[in-house]
Image (cartoon, rainbow, N blue to C red):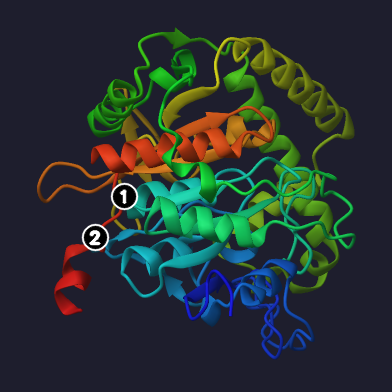
């Protein structure tokens, strides 16, 4: 028995599940030996009584924003099966949005929880970097990888997060922070919370749907002021370089021997990362530090900052380009426009789903906090859910089938 007794959940196929190979969405690991032990987060959920019912589709090795996996097929958005579910945790987002499970596990390096949460219209949490143990999850970028849950309600997201917390000496990157349960504070309301909207980089390149969603959340949370973070674009560029370099270093041995077995959408990016000059990567890390300090100053007077999670709602599977502010840009990397800068400095984020007008697709808003302030983000999220501004109903076609 436990707080999640009997609750079904599923995990991105990046997490070790004893008795199953951890494929990480790849062809190369099809013959890998089965995991001998569950990942730490899987053990935490099962200790709370939850029951794992399966492993979920993803972008190969977590390198993508759309889960258009050439080995296993695309993850389809339950709100419109012709559209993407986001990535790289696309299967995790789609499973919750379709009502298959109330909770799922994902990872977030540059937006891989927040993008699927936005496009599938569900709740998602990227905790502070180092809050949850990554042990037993296949790595991508050691200095950027986060792990966290998706859920169909704030209460379920909070219950999952509370269960997932715990110190794990097997993850050297985990911070020695004691667990902080967020469920008891969900009814705390908005009193004393200082909320503003991120402008500049985050105010441009939005669709009308993203703009309306941020305005709705801002209105409910009383956010009337705009905060500028001048280094957002530079931090995104730094995250790109760090991701390319660290990801390539991890995969270089198999790239040399199994190049043709890699996902076509991934091959060239990993090779390019392997060729990056070390000076560029060192500079990217310095920019990252400057961006962290700059954001710390920008948040001095604020508890929560708001920004779109994705520039647009879910797009058709196979679409290559996206028009933003009248300019054609590559679609796949552009889904991370607003998530990558935040990943670069490790801040906690709750993605809040905003249902659109009748028949339209949902889209998410990032509630961004200071390090270790997840409890404040959950208070705000609960207030948004209570007000009816944010909600994660099962996609209509699947709700009707149930």
| Up-down relation of residue 7 to residue 342 (above or below) | below
Can residue 312 be seen in the rendering of this structure? no
Query: Splitting the image into 4 quarters, where does residue 288 fall?
Result: top right
The mark nearer the N terminus, 2 or 1, is: 2
Which quarter shows the C terminus? Answer: bottom left
User: Label 1's element?
Assistant: loop
Q: Residue at x 44, y 25 (%)?
A: 306
Label annotation for residue 79? 2
Left or right, residue 162 beside residue 8: right
Q: Residues within 10 Å of mark 1 (few under 14, many from 20)?
A: many
Left or right, residue 343 beside residue 315: right
User: Label 2's element?
Assistant: loop
The residue closer to the viewer here, 72 or 93, is 93
| Up-down relation of residue 100 to residue 87 (above or below) | below
Measured in 3D between alpha carbons, the distance from the residue under mark 2 to the one under mark 1, in whole angstroms, is 9 Å
What number of labels is visible? 2
Q: Residue at x 90, y 59 (%)?
A: 169
| Rendering coords of residue 18 (x, y %) | 71, 86
Which quarter shows the N terminus? Answer: bottom right
Can residue 13 be seen in the rendering of this structure? yes
Q: Residue at x 48, y 19 (%)?
A: 192
| Rendering coords of residue 327 (x, y %) | 34, 25
Tag 1 residue: 314
Query: Splitting the image into 4 quarters, where does residue 35 fall?
Result: bottom right
Whether pointer 2 and pointer 1 mark residues with C-beta atoms closer than 8 Å, the reply is yes
């Amino acid at each position: 028995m436990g707080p999640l007794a009997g609750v079904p959940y599923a995990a991105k196929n990046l997490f070790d599940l004893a008795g199953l190979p951890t494929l990480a969405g790849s062809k190369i690991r099809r013959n890998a030996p089965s995991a001998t032990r569950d990942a730490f987060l899987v053990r935490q959920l099962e200790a709370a009584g939850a029951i794992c019912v399966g492993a979920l589709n993803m972008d190969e090795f977590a390198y993508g924003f759309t889960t258009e996996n050439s080995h296993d097929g695309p993850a389809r958005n339950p709100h419109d099966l012709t559209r993407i579910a986001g990535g790289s945790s696309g299967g995790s987002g789609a499973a919750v949005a379709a009502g298959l499970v109330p909770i799922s596990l994902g990872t977030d390096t540059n937006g891989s929880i927040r993008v699927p949460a936005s496009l599938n219209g569900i709740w998602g949490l990227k905790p502070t970097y180092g809050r949850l143990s990554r042990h037993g999850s296949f790595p991508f970028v050691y200095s950027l990888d986060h792990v966290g849950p998706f859920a169909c309600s704030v209460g379920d997201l909070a219950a999952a997060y509370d269960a997932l917390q715990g110190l794990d000496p097997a993850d050297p990157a985990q911070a020695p922070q004691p667990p902080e349960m967020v469920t008891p504070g969900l009814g705390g309301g908005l009193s004393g919370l200082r909320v503003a909207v991120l402008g500049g980089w985050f105010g441009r390149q939005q669709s009308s749907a993203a703009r309306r969603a941020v305005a709705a959340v801002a209105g409910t949370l009383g956010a009337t002021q705009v905060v500028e973070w001048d280094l957002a674009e530079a931090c995104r560029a730094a995250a790109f370089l760090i991701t390319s370099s660290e990801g390539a270093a991890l995969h270089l041995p198999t790239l040399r021997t199994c190049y043709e077995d890699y996902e076509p959408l991934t091959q060239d990016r990993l090779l390019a990362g392997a060729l990056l000059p070390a000076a560029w990567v060192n500079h990217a890390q310095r920019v990252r530090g400057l961006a962290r300090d700059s954001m710390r100053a920008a948040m001095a007077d604020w508890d929560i900052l708001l920004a779109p999670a994705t520039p647009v709602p879910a797009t058709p599977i196979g679409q290559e380009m996206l028009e933003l502010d009248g300019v054609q840009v590559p679609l796949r990397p552009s889904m991370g426009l607003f998530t990558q800068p935040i990943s670069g400095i490790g801040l906690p984020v709750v993605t809040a789903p905003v249902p659109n007008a009748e028949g339209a697709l949902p889209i998410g808003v990032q509630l961004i906090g200071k390090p270790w302030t997840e409890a404040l983000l959950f208070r705000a999220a609960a207030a948004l859910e209570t007000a009816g501004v944010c909600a994660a109903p099962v996609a209509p076609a699947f709700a009707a089938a149930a």
